[in-house]
Every structure is written in C-alpha cells, then in structure tokens.
Amino acid sequence: MTDDLRQRRLEVIREHMDTEVTKEFDRTLATFKAGSEGRPHYEIMATGQVFDGDDEVMGYYRTTRTAFPDQRHDNVRYHVADDTVVVEFDLLGTNLGEFYGLPPTGKAFRVPVAAVFFFDGDRIVNERIYFDSASLVTQIGRSELLSLVGTGEL
C-alpha cells in the first residue's frame, strides 16, 4: 500500500466517524463504495445484526441516534493493514430516547469498541464492529435486555 492510499483511507474513516457524530448521515454513507461494486454494509458482531444497503444502514443510524443522540467517540487509535483499518475507540452516549421499545433511562455509557473497516481502494466496503453489548445495556440501566444479547435481536 502506498503512503497516499494509506492517508486517503484514514481521511475517509475520519470523515465517516465525524459525520456519524454530527448526524450528517448522507455524508457518512458517501464514505462507502457506491454503484454496482459496493454499498453500505455493517456487521454488529455483539448482536449478530447485519445492515446492508443505504436504507438499512440509514435505519441503523436513525435508531441508534434516537436512543443515544449524543453518541460520540473518544480515545481513537488507528491500525492500518493491507485491505483493512482497525479503529479502536471508546463509544460514549446517553440513553435519551427509546431503545428497543423501552423508554429512556437518562443514563450514560462508555464501552470500548474495535471497528474493522474493509476497503476497496479508498472506499469502505464493510464496517464490522466488536463491543461488549452486555456492558452497554447494564450501564444504561437496561439489564432486562441481557437475555437478548447475542441472539441477533439486540
């Protein structure tokens, strides 16, 4: 990989993550490879959920930002490989909206996350996210959701 490609990939990830925080989701979607060769694709490993295509990914953004409108990243670290970039960070937010049909608790969370961004050229083709969902639901006061962790329903 050239230094130029490495730099472009890091810039794409920064744009992706920054626009998630500012809720400029059209710009976030634009960081994925488009056209017949690509589309937005997320795999949430802790929950077994997969979001594929513009509509599903936009739905994921809207649902998570309804539940956690102040969702953001802290302590971001990048690890660059040939076809991926692994990004480690703390994900923070406060449960201020409905979450899986339950009213908000007003409680905050901070969980470590590893996100693996897969690339074709300088565009993202998949984001695979690893985090401890049990810790997140416990921190926001929703331990009743623990039975759903890992089932694909949460």
Image (cartoon, helix red, strand yellow):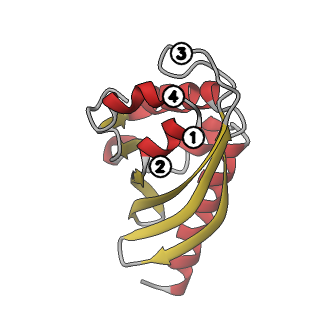
**Callout 3 touching callout 4 (CB < 8 Å):** yes
In this rendering, the answer to whether 46 lies above or below 53 is below
Disc 2 to disc 1, C-alpha distance: 32 Å
Q: Which residue is mark 3?
A: 102
Above or below, 101 against 18 in this view is above
Nearest to N terminus: mark 3 or mark 4: 3
Say which residue label 2 marks: 32
| Marks 4 and 1 in Cβ contact (< 8 Å) | no
The image quadrant that residue 4 belongs to is: bottom right
Label 3 is placed on what type of residue?
Answer: Leu
What amino acid type should be assigned to the residue bearing mark 2? Phe
- The label nearer to you, 2 versus 4, is 4
The residue that disc 4 covers is: 142
Q: Position of residue 105 (x, y in %)?
A: 65, 24
**Tag nearer the camera, 3 or 4:** 4
Frontmost of labels 3 and 2 is: 3
Residue for point 48% across, 46% down:
135
Q: Secondary structure at mark 3?
A: loop
Gap in Å between the C-alphas at discs 3 and 1? 15 Å
